[in-house]
Image: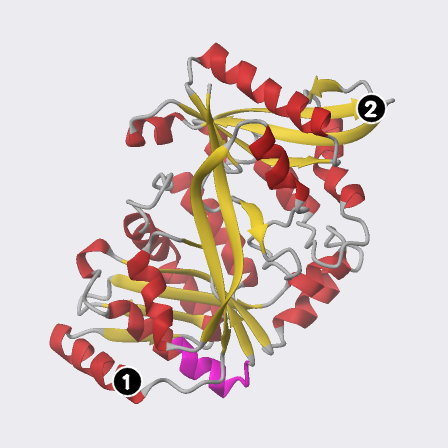
Amino acid sequence: MNTVVKEVTKISELRKFVKFPFKLYKGNPYWVPPLILDEMQTLRKDKNPSLEYCKSRYWLAFQSGKVVGRIAAILNPRANEKWGYRHLRFGWMDFIDDIEVSKALLNEVEKWAEELGMDTIEGPLGFTDMDFEGLLIEGFDKLPTIANIYNYPYYPVHLETHGFGKQEDWVQFKFNASQPVPEKIERVNNLIMKKYNLHIKKFTKARHVKPYGKKFFQTLNKAFVNLYGFVELTDREIDRYVKQYLTFIRPQLVCFVTDEHDNIIAFGVSMPSLSKAFQKAKGRLFPFGFIHILRALSKYEEVDLYLNGVHPDWQKKGVASIYYAEMNKTYIRLNVKTAISNQQLANNIDAISMWNNYENEPYITRRCYKKEI
């Protein structure tokens, strides 16, 4: 069937771009729909501060007048400058199981990359590391966290057919959250804290977390600085994420490790699982979607580890173990049964090895693909 690809240039078309996956994944028990409002704000130049320096284009694929696919292309010059390459990113990629549709969409990205003088296209990636990234390659029968995306098993087959290969993998693990902190870990953590005069910051009210918002993301900037594709968040981006995250933050599930000057040197942020609530909300906060989300925020049976990291000056000193042990104690106190780790690079051995101290099982693997042009 003939496939026609059209660029999205109007807000009304952008809304159609955002809504396409809702039809593609309708009835799929493992797809977690994003909030339509958040998606619109991320993709709009007047709403997303990342588009003050990034360029983006969006396309929809049609067959017989019906939308059958979508894709976004992103030029992030700060990433190219930092990492010394000429890459064009793609993301927000969804399509029916038709090889001609995926080819037509990726061809548009390739053409723009050539026009810009790029030599490689890679993805799925977003504007920043806080956006959705990675294509699901293992764990198709698992429910993702709201920070991750789902795709059908035919997606990676299509990309590999079109000449794409592995760039990087991210992995997630599932834990029994009620398992006690190993005695050895507790003993070592106490020695580390005493040696370096470190302190644990835990909270009971969201307003007590707010003053640490910017400090937290500034530490995140430094903690993630050497991770694949990461570019430090700008002040405007930090302001956006502080506002976005503090809307849903559960203070009991936030743990910071600070030095003697109250600087955040390590952090662990988790949240009650909102995946099923987002499914019930069907992408909308109103009129009733927010009710499902508020209910889920008061339940702690399963939690998702959203963000964790350690300032570079404190890495390889065992500090990561401190915040996770403290979070573990909180999970036990709140009767949490399971925890899903955040998405971590498979080759980030230092970060992943922390989980070896606890019983865990592989949960989901995602992949970033690349193709030289």
Query: In the rendering, which numbered label is found on residue 63?
Result: 2
Q: What residue sits 49% from the left and 70% below the top?
A: 361
Name the image quarter holding the N terminus. top right
Considering the numbered disc 2 on the image, is that residue within a helix, a strand or a loop?
A: strand
Q: Residue at x 77, y 42 (%)?
A: 24
User: The disc labelled 2 sits on which kind of residue?
Assistant: Gln
Q: In this view, does 66 lie above or below 270?
A: above
Query: Secondary structure under badge 1?
Result: helix
Q: Give the range drawn in magenta.
A: 327-336
Q: In which quarter of the image is residue 79?
A: top left
Q: Is the magenta stretch mostly helix, strand or loop?
A: helix
Residue depicted at 72% across the width and 54% down the height: 285
Q: Does the magenta stretch include residue 333?
A: yes
Mark 2 touching mark 1, by CB under 8 A? no
Q: Is any atom of residue 221 visible in this view?
A: yes
Does residue 343 show up? no
Occupied quadrant, residue 158: top right
The residue where tag 1 is placed is 186
